[in-house]
Image (cartoon, helix red, strand yellow):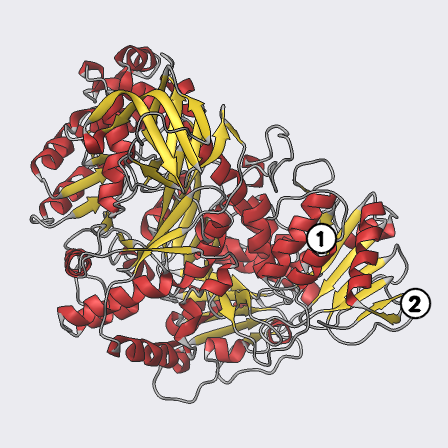
Amino acid sequence: MGRAWIGGKPAALERALAEAAGLLAASRCPLIAGLGTDVAGARAAIGLADRIGGVIDHMNSDALLRDLAVLREARMMVTTPNEARLRADTLLLVGPSLEKEAPDLSRWLGLGSSGKGDAATRRSLVRLCPGGAATIPGEKTVECDRDRLPAVLAALRARLAGRPVGKTRIPAKTIDEIATLLKAARFGVAVWSAVDLDALAIEMLCGIVADLNMETRFTAFAIPPGDNAIGVLQACGWMTGFPMRTCFGRGQPEHDPWRFDGARMIAAGEADCVVWISAYRAAAPRWTDGPPVIALTTGEAMPGRGPAVQIEVGRPGVDHDGVEQCPALGTLVAVAAARRSETTSVADAIGGIMAAMPGAQVAT
Amino acid sequence: MKTRIAGGRVIDPAHGRDGIGDIWISDGRIIAAPPPGTTADATHDADGMIVMAGAIDIHSHIAGWNVNTARLLLPELHRAAAKRPAATPLSNAGWSTFATGCLYAQMGFTTVVEPAVSPHYALHAHLELADIPIIDKATLAVLGNDDFLLGLMRKRESASVIEDYVAWTLDATRSLGIKVVNAGGSLALKANVRQFSFDDVVPQYDVTSREIVKTLQRATHGLGVPHPLHVHCNNLGMAGSDATALTTIAAAEGLPLHLAHLQFYGYGQEGAHGFSSAAPRLAEAVNGAKSVTIDVGQVMFGQTVTISLDTLRQFNARRHARPRKWVILEDDSNGAGIVPYDYRASDFYNAVQWAVGLELFLLIDDPWRVFFTTDHPNGAPFTTYPEIFALLMDRDLRARQIAALPPDAMAVTTLPAITREYSLTEIATMTRAAPARLLGLADRGHLGAGAIGDVAVYADDRDRARMFRSAALVFKDGELVVRDGAVTGYRWGRALAVRPERDRAIDRRMTRYYEDRYGLSDTFLKVPDHAVGRPEPFELVRCAR
């Protein structure tokens, strides 16, 4: 059990579930967004969307879909942070937000580990556009503005192919030095975050990796967006065939990264009821105005006008057992509750809402 | 609750049965015919119908990271084709776990093995399997490109330690057996080796691919795991790969060994294109090696996607991707590669591949040792099975299709000259009785008393493809789940797994290994019941030891 609020006032959980069920039953275009939850919560949310003809979106879909756009329109060599730590003799770190998006990056990659003669200390490290990130001893750093990254990557790819390039703001000699370093890799790994790069820049970077594999070995990984975006993506993939930003309104899942962008749907006045899920932290939607919100979040009642209904949910791996993506390994893992509590899980809250809705149902 | 399937032609090769009769099911199990006059709670008239046990697919990529990544790679491939009644959850998703279970059940399949699960991805695979309705499932855990095993071999550790490690892996990943994929090849690729054969040495580990296969074969056998080591050979898909397959068959040395999707190794180097069918050579070798079983991996024409843990092969195949996009994963476990492909009837090479698969089916004389697969979706989607049954059962149908294919392709195969036609008994052997025996599932694949009540009933039809595409009735655990080709009963199956005995010293060693190498607890790759999220998600299969 957990706390619940209706219109900002404390309410019994049963009443809150019934109120949520009523709002959803009356909705003609419900949006299930946020979706920061474990696999069980994602499964339940997708089952709810299937039932009510809603749209599912994740709070980090923007970054996630930039990576996916490259995957499904071009190609990708991928590895895991852990394998990069164990095997990479060359690292190409791209963008200023890596450590912000992955606070454990240094540990994942064994960066700056003290010298025991292990691979980490003999590595070539190249860093493009580090921004304010702390530099690592021995790394070759190329400073540039983030919005110049696509041009720098393009120049680098051209030089790797032995083609001439026009002027960038980076000296040609620097670009050539980096190209030489990358070509000398025996097993290199490129790292980026889609927070920093648009899809075309990511495609360029993945193209560099692909080109390097003509002669040597190189692979890559993107920092996974937070709030278990990849875990939710996996569940969404096997349940619907598609990533998030998928709609069930016409009886079968339809995926459209623009049409089913939750923020756009709110701005355009298309969605008339929102289920907002944030079980890892008490994140609020980016929009402030809009249709009634049923919030399934951790912690206290949201301030301000607040959601129409709010149900406190437990944190996966803290309040209850869960399954989520482990970024270091790139796979789904079971996490046990660290401080087990009676706070309801997202899956159970959605189960409760669905049970309170009229009509028969077949459980997913 | 007694169910009677009355008056059908019962084909049950495990008991040498082919005749008109009844099948009775009670409490989910097949029972001996009760005394005359016993009334059933439900009677299904099977007059004019064929009654078989539920079919078993031993090799079909239906779940896990690789399959899911293929979905995400190819959104254009699986838009829901047509709206179906929304009687079941996610019933209109084009390529989902939910559709997978329904489509298999509609064809009379009740047990399917996902044959390629890297241990680190076992939980993911089981989560997907748990969302595949109706049918039962199982996984094969993949070893042979993992640092721990090759480390043991490099240090020449004892066979019993290796057996303990294999047993630990089976238990942690809740698998039914062990597979090896291009043994050592994924590790070789990481060291920039682009071609890797059976007697090549894995860089840094000082062991050959042959030694890995033999080590795992002996360990699997020694543990009493019913399913023999499942081998995906080196050099898949290459002209001249028949030599690799022949070498691997010879290496079985009288111990059980299963070779997966042999069709992809059935290529000689004769003819104007340097690409020809080697199926007769391979079939002769299989016929002579009684401890060896194979499945075919039949190619059918059309768009598909190849999903494989053979990263070396997929890396080399990436430039042939149709459409031109692909994913190669190199991870801590085994790696994987997803490469879409479009098999074209007008393409010389693809036409030869189609013929090679059929030749293997028709030239291997023992239906107990040749298994029915398309290596779904690598050769073709599993939904093409009915068309393949029809091709095997009808030489005239084959002749008509051969006539439409490039003559120079057919000229480098023996298919046009083969007259054999499979009987229904042989089909039932290959898809029911033999797979159950191969996997050690004593209560499946047959219709004797005590068997699980998995029964498929087909309306006898000269059009065998139509007959096998939509079963008239399918029972799973005695429950009616399909009627007239449509899903009518929705339920959740189990995943079958073995748990051979082991010395628990290996558990402590694995804990230390994962802490040292990954800085992580080894619990991450274990698959606890609670994480799967369904009641009784697993069923234990007995080992011989």
Amino acid type for the residue under numbered disc 2: Arg
Residues at discs 1 and 2 both on one chain: yes
Indicate which disc residue A305 carries: 2
Vertical comparison of B350 with A361: above or below: above
Indicate which disc residue B370 carries: none
Distance from Cα at disc 1 to Cα at disc 2: 28 Å
Q: Name the quarter where the N terminus of chain B is drawn.
A: top left
In the rendered image, is residue A177 in sight? no
In the rendered image, is residue B484 in sight? yes
| Residue located beneath label 1 in the image | A355
Q: Position of residue B418 (x, y in %)?
A: 19, 17
Q: Earlier in the sequence, mark 1 or mark 2?
A: 2
Residue at the front extreme, as displayed: B37
Q: Going 65% across and 60% down the picture, which residue do you hit? A: A347
Report the side of B92 relative to B37 (left or right). right
Q: Position of residue B214 (x, y in %)?
A: 14, 57
Q: Where is residue A122 in the image (x, y as percent from the top left)?
A: 38, 80
Q: Going 48% across and 51% down the picture, which residue do you hit? A: B130
Front: mark 1 or 2: 1
Amino acid type for the residue under numbered disc 1: Ala
Q: Name the quarter where the C terminus of chain B is drawn.
A: bottom left
Q: Position of residue B296 (x, y in %)?
A: 26, 35
Q: Helix, strand or loop at disc 1?
A: helix
Q: Helix, strand or loop at disc 2?
A: loop
Q: In front here: B447 or A239?
A: B447
